[in-house]
Amino acid sequence: MSVFKNVIVYRIETTWSQPLEEVEKGLDAQRFVPCGPSQEKSVGWVEPRGEAHGPLVESVAGQWLLEFMIESKTLPASVVRRKVEERAAQIEATTGRKPGKKEKKELKEDITHELLPLAFTRHARVAVWIDPQTHRLVVNASNAQRADEVVTSLVKALDGFAVSLVNTQVEPAAAMAEWLSSQEPPAGFTIDRECELKASDESKAVVRYAKHPLDIDEIRQHIANGKRPTRLAMTWDDRVSFELTEGLQLRKIVFLEGTLDDAPASGSGKEDNFDADAAIATGELGQLVPDLLEALGGEMQLGAAPAASAPAAPAAKPEEEALADESAPF
């Protein structure tokens, strides 16, 4: 099973209810099939344990684990471009006319089709977790486009399945600004040593801090001057570290050493490791996510009017801005 490192959380409509057997049957109709010779992309569901012809849904302590496979073929753009120019030159030499934009586009499509059997193949596996008790869907993806592919496949496969992104009463950016300004994170959380601040004006100026103390006046001044936190590194209950984004995504999730103490005992086999990993991931995130939503004012009900943002940060003392490490990875 892929590790949950970057997750996007959805709320499953409470009207959806299917037993495990029906979910398995629905996913089986969209089981992954590798790309054909001239096929650019193929997606579908694979066995979470990696065992051929095994179940597509694994239930561990009542939590359902799935895995989505994406296979794509990529051709170097320079190779395709060169082939198009060569083919266009041949046409001009034999007919005396120069191919126009439309014909070049058709040439590009033909050449791409011809070269696909020789293209490099890439695979991406996306871990998916359905909590049938709390009606929560968690997708291990760092961008919305990838998560949308997974959700679209689930909607097609499962009868009546519908989800919506989780929204909170307080916007994450406003909450992060308050936590950084007051240096009072919500109960159970600590602020770590990385953050990103971005100006909301036309300048779009960005300041990043990596491995740097965040309890400094400089950051308060940035916030007072209108920069919004877009990412903030935090730790929950000394058990899980992560980065919260302005879009309510959790990135760079790391399960800390203490989480292993409560993991069920496992043997040395691959199957035992799968169950232990699944129990740790779902057990820890199953507590972290509700605590985080509560820290953001609670989950906003579908159709509810937007609530007020977090209290405004206090004005910081004027101080010369120090340069942040722009080259540091984040």
Image (spheres, rainbow, N blue to C red):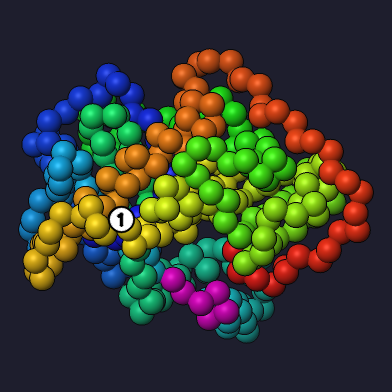
Tell me what residue is drawn at x 59 percent, y 38 percent: 172
Q: Nearer the viewer, residue 328 or 181?
A: 181
Q: Position of residue 290 (x, y in %)?
A: 40, 34
In the image, residue 303 sits, relative to residue 329, either above or below, namely: above
In the rendered image, residue 13, in percent from the top left (x then y), is placed at: 33, 24
The count of marks equals: 1
Q: Residues within 10 Å of mark 1 (few under 14, many from 20)?
A: some
Asked if residue 4 is among those painted magenta in the image, a careful observer would answer: no
The reply, left or right, for residue 41 in relation to residue 31 is right
Q: Position of residue 176 (x, y in %)?
A: 63, 42
Give the side of residue 50 with respect to residue 167, left or right: left
Q: Position of residue 274 (x, y in %)?
A: 17, 59
On the rendered structure, is 110 left or right of 135? right
Magenta highlight range: 74-79
Residue 77 highlighted magenta (yes or no): yes
Residue that mark 1 sits on: 259
The quadrant in which the N terminus is found is: bottom left
Front residue (pair 288, 168): 288
Q: Secondary structure at mark 1?
A: helix
**Residue 27 in view here:** no
Residue 174 appears in which quarter of the rendering? top right
Amino acid type of disc 1? Thr
Decide if residue 230 is in sight here: yes
Left or right, 295 with respect to 35, comes to: right
Residue found 57% across the figure and 79% down from its top: 78
Residue 268: name its quadrant. Answer: bottom left
Q: Quadrant of the C terminus?
A: bottom right
- Considering only vertical position in the picture, is 237 above or below 300? below
Q: Residue at x 62, y 41 (%)?
A: 184
Residue pictured at 47% horizontal, 26% vertical: 299
